[in-house]
Image: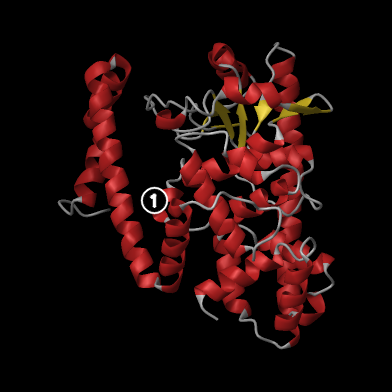
């Protein structure tokens, strides 16, 4: 079983409790013992959907077809993730209460928002990193101060921070499970005029005094997190964690309509819907616009899936390209922005940073 076969097996398995045709396909593969479980564990772990895979196989009564030691391992990891997610939910509710007591209403995003909202049948399905939320720009600095006064501090204790367009550096608090990420924007500056606080505030939802994005905005942000913020549109690859969220959200809103609201964002988001449709074996709920750009993107996606060496080379090339672009953007901003200029001066004067660069360039050995 190669990477492509494992990816498609996992993707279909994530839909078996919603898509009858995938249920039958996966059942046949399991009964015929056509699964390389080592590869499935490797790929599902890489894509952060290992607990979601277990939950769906369990609900479909397919665990009997798995090796017993694998079932025990999957159960153990899923229970650990359940415990973590329950702590994240409690922590997010504390943050929500703290900010609302100070007249600020956070809107919870991505994995944490999905957990609080109840998107998953089993809270253990989603693997979550940070507690992301957005506040209006006028409340941004006050929000930072409130969390710091409550015991939160920067994860990386630097004396200077890059003037981020999107969010404040991650904050954590002693004895709390997750870092908090305070957003004033949702994506990179290039696209921020299309998807921002003023755009999403019109459709927010509320459950028990906790606020979330509307379903179309949740679906869009699930794609944006991969395609734009993580440059997935350039890499032409798949993130099953994001794709699984898109699949579940496509049951609650029209995916095609969700991305047709945008101009610059349309192609990257529509491209992701196109490969989701392919990878999940064409579920009716994941609709996209069949453009030439989407057709080419699907072809590139399959090419790199089937040629992993070329995929690695493409990734390296794209990473170099993005890195150069980011450096040039910093230099351009430093010419016109005092805040960016001050950051750049402090950065290049930082002895630790200088040492790291010398090691990266091979001019000095690491200790």
Q: Measuring from the top left, give residue 164's x and y in whole percent.
A: 42, 27
Residue at the spot 56% in from the left edge and 49% down from the top edge: 289
Q: Which color mode does the image show?
A: secondary structure
Quarter that holds the N terminus: bottom right
Occupied quadrant, residue 94: top right
Q: Nearer the viewer, residue 123 or 206?
A: 206
Q: Measuring from the top left, give residue 326's x and y in whole percent.
A: 30, 37
Q: Measuring from the top left, give residue 194's x and y in whole percent.
A: 50, 28
| Residue at the spot of label 1 | 234
Residue at the spot 64% in from the left edge and 46% down from the top edge: 128
Q: Measuring from the top left, give residue 244's x and y in whole percent.
A: 65, 54
Is residue 177 something that shows in the picture? no
Residue at the spot 54% in from the left edge and 62% down from the top edge: 46
Callout 1 secondary element: helix
Residue at the spot 72% in from the left edge and 50% down from the top edge: 248
| Left or right of 59, for residue 300 | left
Q: Nearer the viewer, residue 329 or 200?
A: 200
- Give the vertical position of 286 relative to 8 (above or below): above
Occupied quadrant, residue 306: bottom left
Occupied quadrant, residue 72: bottom right
- Give the vertical position of 179 relative to 39 (above or below): above
Is residue 102 something that shows in the picture? yes
């Amino acid at each position: 079983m190669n990477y492509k076969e494992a990816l498609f097996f996992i993707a279909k398995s994530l839909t078996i409790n919603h898509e009858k045709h995938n249920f039958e396909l996966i059942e046949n593969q399991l009964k015929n013992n056509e699964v390389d479980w080592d590869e499935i564990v490797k790929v599902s772990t890489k894509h952060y959907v290992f607990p979601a895979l277990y939950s769906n196989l369990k609900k479909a009564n397919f665990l009997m077809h798995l090796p017993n030691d694998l079932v025990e391992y999957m159960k153990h990891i899923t229970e650990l993730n359940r415990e973590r997610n329950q702590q994240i939910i409690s922590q997010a509710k504390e943050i929500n209460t703290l900010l609302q007591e100070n007249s600020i209403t956070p809107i919870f995003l991505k994995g944490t928002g999905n957990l609080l909202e109840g998107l998953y049948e089993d809270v253990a399905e989603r693997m979550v990193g940070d507690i992301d939320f957005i506040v209006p720009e006028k409340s941004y600095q006050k929000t930072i101060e409130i969390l710091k006064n409550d015991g939160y501090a920067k994860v990386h204790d630097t004396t200077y921070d890059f003037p981020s367009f999107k969010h404040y550096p991650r904050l954590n608090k002693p004895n709390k499970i997750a870092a908090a990420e305070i957003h004033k924007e949702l994506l990179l500056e290039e696209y921020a005029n299309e998807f921002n606080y003023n755009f999403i505030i019109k459709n927010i939802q509320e459950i028990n005094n906790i606020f979330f994005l509307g379903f179309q905005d949740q679906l869009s942000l699930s794609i944006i997190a991969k395609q734009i913020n993580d440059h997935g549109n350039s890499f032409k690859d798949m993130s099953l964690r994001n794709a699984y969220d898109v699949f579940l959200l496509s049951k609650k809103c029209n995916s095609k309509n969700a991305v047709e609201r945008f101009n610059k964002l349309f192609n990257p988001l529509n491209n992701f819907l196109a490969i989701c449709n392919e990878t999940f074996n064409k579920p009716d709920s994941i609709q996209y616009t069949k453009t030439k750009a989407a057709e080419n993107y699907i072809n590139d996606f399959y090419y790199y899936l089937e040629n992993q060496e070329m995929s690695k080379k493409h990734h390296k090339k794209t990473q170099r390209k993005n890195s150069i672009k980011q450096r040039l953007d910093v230099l351009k901003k430093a010419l016109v922005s005092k805040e960016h200029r001050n950051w750049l001066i402090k950065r290049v004067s930082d002895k630790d940073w200088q040492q790291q660069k010398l090691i990266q360039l091979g001019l000095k050995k690491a200790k």
